[in-house]
Amino acid sequence: MKPPTSLALGTPQGGRPPAARQSRFRGVKLGLALWAKAALAIAMLWLAVQAAPAAEPVKIQGLRGGTPVSQDNAPTASHQERDHPVSDRDFVQQPPLIPHTTAGYQITKNFNKCMDCHAWQKTKTSGATKVSVTHFRTREGQELDNISPRRYFCTQCHVAQTDAKPLVDNSFKRARGLQ
């Protein structure tokens, strides 16, 4: 006599058809094989680590030296260079360096000492370079009557020239078009 079947699926009562039971056992065998391979890989890695000679720990020296983050490093001795000709630029779109000292210059939301000389209406008498027209545009490209708020704080981009030594060695070369 034939075993009773489920009406919905046509499978023997009690679960899966015989082919599904076989695929379930095949999946279990594959799972066990993967576990065995993983265990073997871990064992081999552990043996390799145990057999490797103990290496000296790597010492990393940061720019702060041994100074903890909670303390400040003493400033290095450098000074801003006094008035001299404008330096050449090293890369395209580089903001010009400031060719004079800016010690004591005040730049706040209400006052910008740089504009005493670099404002368009004052450059003839001061002999200073005019502020670029790009500083009078908003992010969306709209022309303004005064310097755009996002360009108002000059020292965000422009820095005074100093005699400071590089913090790290580098192989920087000027852009070919500027050499």
Image (cartoon, grey):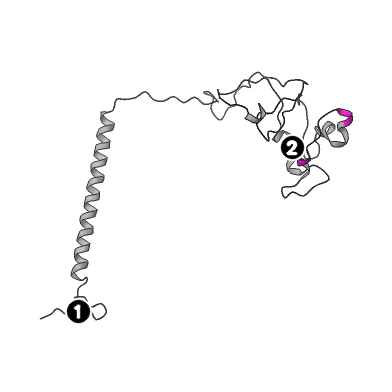
Left/right of residue 130 with respect to residue 88 in the rendered view: right
Q: Which mark is residue 123?
A: none
Q: Position of residue 169 (x, y in %)?
A: 55, 22
Identified at 46% across, 26% down, the residue is 60
> Is 130 covered by the magenta stretch?
yes
What residue is shown with label 1? 5
> Is 147 covered by the magenta stretch?
no
In the rendered image, which quarter contains the N terminus?
Answer: bottom left
Quarter of the rendering containing residue 170: top right
Identified at 74% across, 27% down, the residue is 98
In the rendered image, which quarter contains the C terminus?
Answer: top right
Q: Camera-side residue: 121 or 110?
A: 121
Q: Position of residue 46 (x, y in %)?
A: 26, 36
Q: Amino acid at mark 1?
A: Thr
Q: Amino acid at mark 2?
A: Phe
Magenta highlight range: 124-134
Q: Is residue 149 above or below residue 123?
A: below
**Of helix, strand and loop, which one carries label 1?**
loop
